[in-house]
Image (cartoon, grey):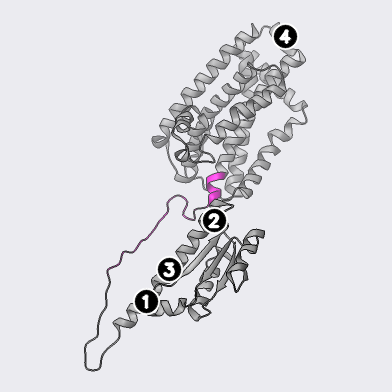
């Protein structure tokens, strides 16, 4: 253990003398968290709205007021003719145009079908779908209230000397309730992913480059002639990055709680333990990459394009696994980030305990053990 400790101290001193590496290890994760936390927001609000009101009645003006009062739309202009809609959408000044047909108000009063058209810019398909959904919901509420008003008027009409005619209609009332993220904030979904990305960067990319650097500058041969066993060299190389990874884990978790208000409903100690299991996989993959390349540039390119990017895309951190083709869904089974993503969102948002996350813990343990074993075997062969 004394020899292992000496190798760890040697690695830490080497990192300290590399002044360019300190910002990468400390400031880099913070910048990633701030950039993704503020920029990666899929909540669609303040949609530029263009209105064409051909009816010009109290009812049509009330409908426009509904759009503005919802908080989802910003009125950017009004037009008189439909041929003036396209320039607004073409230049991006408006994203949704609402056309209120002539006779809208009379149709609401008399119970006939009132016509409203919504035109959306489909360049950004998600924003277009969300915008159309907002419009449909607002119009549906306005229509339901108009129907209710007509029923009330009809039900309270009393003929002279006669009884009151009660018009009752059966109705179904929907009472939606969203658990764990009541406001449906997309930031709560994406910000925890930053933690997995940072840990992958530190414990996969940097260890692979550190091992290759020893080969490039010729110090690996010097280490081999010392009485250091392979497991001591491997442990000494990896342990500093475990320490740095756990430090960044605590730092990012604190920023997520204090700055972005992401709730931590589960156990912090459980999350830390699961993070250690995840680090076993990434450290093993980093060491495995170091045995397959010869230069630091190759290690960086191989780690990013062959390992990290596919893991990010197929892990469920950004894109739901359920929406992927069947072949890709089966491929995600061997990606450790998939299970760590379940852990992050389970502990942070749902408050899940080990009774729920034990399968992810077992899978991460097995994957980490396999990755470290394969990396150690290949590393020893490369030393020989």
**Distance of label 2 from label 3 (alpha carbons):** 20 Å
Q: Quadrant of residue 243?
A: top right
Q: Main secondary structure of the magenta part?
A: loop
2 vs 4, front mark: 2
Q: Earlier in the sequence, mark 1 or mark 3?
A: 1
The N terminus lies in which quarter of the figure?
Answer: top right
Q: Earlier in the sequence, mark 1 or mark 4?
A: 1
Secondary structure beneath label 4: helix
> In the image, which disc is placed on residue 141?
3
Range of the magenta residues? Answer: 170-190
Asked if the magenta segment contains residue 16, the reply would be no
Q: Position of residue 136 (x, y in %)?
A: 46, 63
**Distance of label 2 from label 1 (alpha carbons):** 30 Å
Q: Mark 2 — residue?
A: 128
**Distance of label 2 from label 4 (alpha carbons):** 60 Å
Q: Mark 3 and mark 1 in contact (Cβ < 8 Å)?
A: no
Q: Position of residue 113 (x, y in %)?
A: 40, 72
> In the image, which disc is placed on residue 111?
1
């Amino acid at each position: 253990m004394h020899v292992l400790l000496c190798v760890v101290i040697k690695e830490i001193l080497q990192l300290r003398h590399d002044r360019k590496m300190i910002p990468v290890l400390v400031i880099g994760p913070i910048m990633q968290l701030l950039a993704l936390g503020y920029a990666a927001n899929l909540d669609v609000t303040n949609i530029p709205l263009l209105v064409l009101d051909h009816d010009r009645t109290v009812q049509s003006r009330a409908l426009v007021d509904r759009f503005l009062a919802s908080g989802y739309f910003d009125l950017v202009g009004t037009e008189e003719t439909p041929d003036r809609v396209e320039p607004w959408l073409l230049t991006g000044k408006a994203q949704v145009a609402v056309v209120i047909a002539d006779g809208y108000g009379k149709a609401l009063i008399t119970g006939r079908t009132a016509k409203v058209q919504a035109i959306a810019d489909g360049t950004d398909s998600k924003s277009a779908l969300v915008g159309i959904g907002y419009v449909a919901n607002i119009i549906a509420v306005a229509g339901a209230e108009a129907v209710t008003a007509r029923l009330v008027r009809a039900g309270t009409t009393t003929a002279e000397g006669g009884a009151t005619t009660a018009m009752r209609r059966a109705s179904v009332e929907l009472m939606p309730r969203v658990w764990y993220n009541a406001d449906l904030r997309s930031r709560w979904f994406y910000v925890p992913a930053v933690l997995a990305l940072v840990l992958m960067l530190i414990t996969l990319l940097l260890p692979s480059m550190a091992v290759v650097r020893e080969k490039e500058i010729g110090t690996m041969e010097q280490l081999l002639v010392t009485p250091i066993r392979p497991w001591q060299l491997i442990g000494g190389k990896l342990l500093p990055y475990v320490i740095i990874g756990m430090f960044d884990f605590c730092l990012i978790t604190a920023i997520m709680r204090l700055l972005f208000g992401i709730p931590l409903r589960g156990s912090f100690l459980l999350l830390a333990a699961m993070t250690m299991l995840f680090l076993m996989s990434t450290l093993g993959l980093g060491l495995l990459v170091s045995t397959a390349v010869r230069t630091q540039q190759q290690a960086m390119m191989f780690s990013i394009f062959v390992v990290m990017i596919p893991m990010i895309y197929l892990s469920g951190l950004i894109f739901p696994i359920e929406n992927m083709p069947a072949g890709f869904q089966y491929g995600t089974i061997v990606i450790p980030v998939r299970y760590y993503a379940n852990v992050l969102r389970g502990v942070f948002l749902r408050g899940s305990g080990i009774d729920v996350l034990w399968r992810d813990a077992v899978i991460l343990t097995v994957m980490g053990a396999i990755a470290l074993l394969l990396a150690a075997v290949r590393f020893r062969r490369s030393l020989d």
